[in-house]
Image (tube, helix red, strand yellow):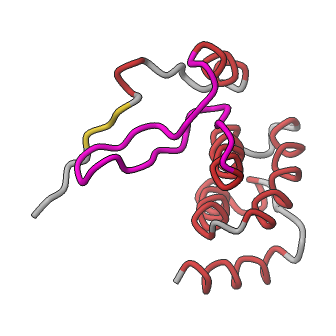
């Protein structure tokens, strides 16, 4: 399904990322999530540069930029810079994917308007309903 969504999105985008006023907040979120869940680094990086420019102009959400940037780091197997990507440690526990020093990550987050990460947020309990 992720591949179908990605192909439809790429056809719609036609190599140009629309700003939040063109697609609305939900549309902007959907675009970022489809790209992130595709796990296609070439597409993430291509639209990441456009997203950065839109964020600088106030036309895209910095949270979405941080998420896509960190996903690119994850796919490259390098430490993330904003602390948005988790990995499963067990069936019930998620841990933040490798990142730079927490103080640097928090500096990066604050710089773009995100709340800092607290040490107790490094691991997250997953509530699985049976």
Judge whether 49 appears above or below 79 on screen: below
Is 27 situated left or right of 42 in this image? Answer: left
| In the image: residue 9, left or right of residue 96 | right
**Image quadrant for the C terminus?**
bottom left
Percent coordinates x, y for residue 71 in the rendering:
64, 51
| Magenta highlight: main SS | loop
Count of residue discs: 0
For the point 67% across and 16% down, the residue is 107
At x 25%, y 47%, the residue is 126
- Rendered view: 24 above or below 85: below
Q: Quadrant of residue 7?
A: bottom right
Q: Residue at x 88, y 50 (%)?
A: 49
Relative image position of residue 44 (x, y in whole percent)? 75, 60
Residue 36 point in image, percent of width and height? 62, 60
Asked if 119 appears above or below 50 in the picture, the reply is above
Q: Residue 87: within the magenta?
A: yes
Q: Residue most toward the front?
A: 77
Residue at 61 percent across and 86 percent down: it is 4
Quick one: 71 or 9, which is closer to the camera?
Answer: 71
* Residue 14 position in % (x across, y down): 87, 77
Q: Residue furthest left?
A: 130
Height in image: 122 above or below 60? above
Q: In the drawing, does residue 34 fall left or right of residue 54?
A: left
Question: What span is colored magenta in the figure?
Answer: 77-102
């Amino acid at each position: 399904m992720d591949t179908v969504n990605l192909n439809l999105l790429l056809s719609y985008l036609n190599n140009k990322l629309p700003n939040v006023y063109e697609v609305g907040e939900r549309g902007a979120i959907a675009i970022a999530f489809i790209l992130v869940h595709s796990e296609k680094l070439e597409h993430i990086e291509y639209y990441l540069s456009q997203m950065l420019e839109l964020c600088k102009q106030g036309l895209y959400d910095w949270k979405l930029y941080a998420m896509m940037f960190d996903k690119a780091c994850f796919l490259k197997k390098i430490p993330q810079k904003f602390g948005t990507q988790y990995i499963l440690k067990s069936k019930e526990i998620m841990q933040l994917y490798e990142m730079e020093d927490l103080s640097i990550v928090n500096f990066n987050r604050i710089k773009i308007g995100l709340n800092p990460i607290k040490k107790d947020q490094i691991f997250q309990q997953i509530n699985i309903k049976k």
